[in-house]
Amino acid sequence: MNVEETALKIQDMTIRGAGRIARAAAAAMLDYAVKCKSMTLEEFLVGLDIAALRLISTRPTAISLSNAVSISIRGTKEQEDFNTARYLVISNAEKFIRNSNSAVEKIGQNALPLMKKPGKVITICNSSAAISAILECHKAGRITGVYACETRPKKQGLITIKELAKAGVPVTLIVDSAMRFVMPEVSIAFVGTDTLESDGSLINKIGTHLLAATARDFNIPIYACAETYKFLPASKIGQHVEIELRPSEEILPASELPANVKVFNPVFDRVPPELITGIITEVGIIKPEEAIRIIKEHLEDI
Ligand code: RI2
């Protein structure tokens, strides 16, 4: 799929999930490099920048998208000619996609010691990293049930229940506002990550802050499942990601909206580090205050 086709599918959320959009963006940069016919190095670099900006413009909150693009083009400006720059993009992008997929698997393995005895899990939205954690614990016989929040307005929870049911995990769908009702039964919460900032703040689907605050009220541990490429390098210097506002039609069709009524549709939450028990990465489990170390060790040069 080329850059424009990929950008349109990320924008309309046909391709969604911070990990999936990152892998799709890397694949689009790879596609661009493969299809480039002979040109000067300068022409190639300008084309890369245009492709990068188009992809990054699609969704502002998941830093995985821009990190994937930066990693795909890393080092191209230092190359001597078009062909070496072109092959560098191809190998960077292929490596990112491989590492991203294996990171999701490793997060599942790293999550297992957190469920020492069988219990119930709660999750929100549809996160491949959180699902990986749940599936590993399920395979070890540690899961007696999963509460999956429906996750208004796009209801990504309906994807989660299908994936877990197909894997034989006992899963129960709840409306988001029932999360407090079921929390007393829960042993642990696993949630996904769109962006992890250097102070340990978690940016994830709207409703995650509510889930974390409810977990704290019932003294339930909550872990963010975050591949290292979801950490925000620029947050070291105080930059934050923008919380995406999406069309009001996702909440209510215009035809049903009464006159003089506005709709506000923020689709991500910012969860303060003090509400997060830990962050499960592919390189191990860290405390929120260690996020800056991950950025220094894994994202310093992007
Ligand atoms: P994985 C999703 O956002 C959810 O917020 C999910 O928790 C996060 O990306 C991470 O998903 P959206 O694309 O990378 O549904 O773990 O808006 O799959």
Image: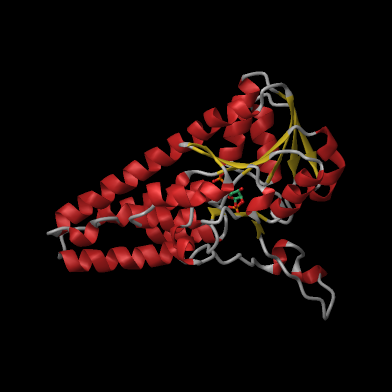
Residue 48 placed where, x, y %? 30, 63
Above or below 280: residue 250: below
Say which quarter of the image contains residue 166.
top right
Q: Residue furthest left?
A: 80
Q: Residue furthest front?
A: 289
Q: Residue at x 70, y 62 (%)?
A: 250
The answer to whether any part of residue 17 appears in the image is: no
Above or below 79: residue 211: above
Say which quarter of the image contains residue 201.
bottom right
Above or below 191: residue 162: above
Q: Residue at x 43, y 51 (%)?
A: 295
Image side of residue 52 versus residue 12, left or right: left
Say which quarter of the image contains residue 262.
bottom right
Q: Residue furthest right?
A: 181
Give the quadrant of the C terminus.
Answer: bottom left
Image side of residue 64 versus residue 247, left or right: left
Q: Residue furthest bottom?
A: 260
Residue 132 placed where, x, y %? 57, 33
Image side of residue 71 versus residue 144, left or right: left
Q: Residue at x 83, y 79 (%)?
A: 259
In the foreground, 56 or 283: 283
In the foreground, 162 or 287: 287
Image side of residue 175 versus residue 188, left or right: right
The answer to whether any part of residue 98 appears in the image is: yes
Residue 248 placed where, x, y %? 71, 68
Residue 91 placed where, x, y %? 27, 45
